[in-house]
Image (cartoon, grey):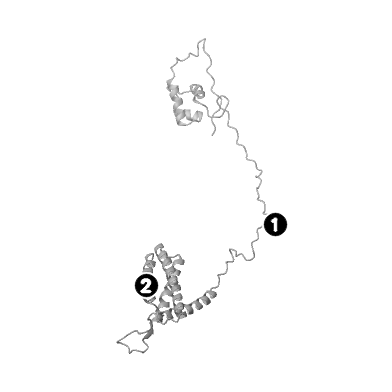
Amino acid sequence: MTAPTINGTRYPQPIEDLLPAARALDLPEGETFPSRNRLMREFRIGAPKAGELLALLKAEPATPPIDSTGPDATDPAPAPVVPEPAPPVEPDPTPAPKITTAEPDAEATLVSRPDTPTADEPGRRPVVWPVVLMALGAFVAVWSGWVGLGKLTGFGKVDLLPGIVEPGSWATIDSAITLPIGVEAYAAYALYVWLSGRVPTRARTFAKWSALASLAVGALGQVAYHLLTAYDVTAAPWWITTLVSCLPVAVLGMGAALAHLVREGH
């Protein structure tokens, strides 16, 4: 919908330009001012602007009617001619040019190294059998060292069920094997908990330091055994015996504490 042509333009007119045309509107008998709806319809303006235009008309001083039959009578001002709206402009039937992106140059294609795994071809997992082979060799050396140190510090054969099973039967065991089983097994488990990244922070911190401590104790135990053997010592000094005797109790306490911390996050 376009605005009426007033003063040679179709654009919305200011109220000052619409006021003369509003005065010239033909009114039915008995009406002094046009209604707001008629102003909106005639000039294609909104309700606020029509209300303001009507207020200006009502604020003007009243003028006596002019006798059209007298000698000084003049022809009333002609109503403004509202031209017909221009016909809509037909869109151009010519389609817009299609924008195409340039194809990448084949010579600029990046070529990866032949041994680089792609997204569709996952890389192969590293083999673990060398680790098993190294662990077997370390197991033999560590086992013999701890068992030998245990014998030098008073560990030996004991009856598991004294008073129940006859001494010397199948219930007899060498207590020296508790050293490699306890110390080295705990070190391996604590190392696994530390590096797994699937446990709470407190458990990881405790596992880290206790694993390092267990590995250090294991290394010192091997050094002590080989030094005592090299010097043909048949009984370890009292302070070595004291430390080695406390290892099973220490391993029990650290294992129970680590198990408790691991279960905190589950």
**Mark before the other along the chain sequence, 1 or 2:** 1
Mark 1, mark 2: which one is toward the viewer?
A: 2
Horizontally, residue 166 falls left or right of residue 65, namely left
Quarter of the image where one finds residue 113: bottom right
Horizontally, residue 59 falls left or right of residue 77, namely left
Quarter of the image where one finds residue 92: top right
Residue depicted at x 40% and y 65%: 206
Check the image and name the residue furthest to the front: 231
Which amino acid lies under the numbered mark 2 shown in the image of this protein?
A: Ala
From the top left corner, tell me how far across and down residue 118 is, in percent: 60, 64
Residue depicted at x 70% and y 57%: 107
Q: Is residue 29 visible?
A: no
Q: Which residue is mark 1?
A: 107
Which amino acid lies under the numbered mark 1 shown in the image of this protein?
A: Glu
Q: Secondary structure at mark 2?
A: helix
Residue contact at pointers 1 and 2, CB within 8 angstroms: no
Q: Which residue is mark 2?
A: 250
Residue depicted at x 47% and y 31%: 46
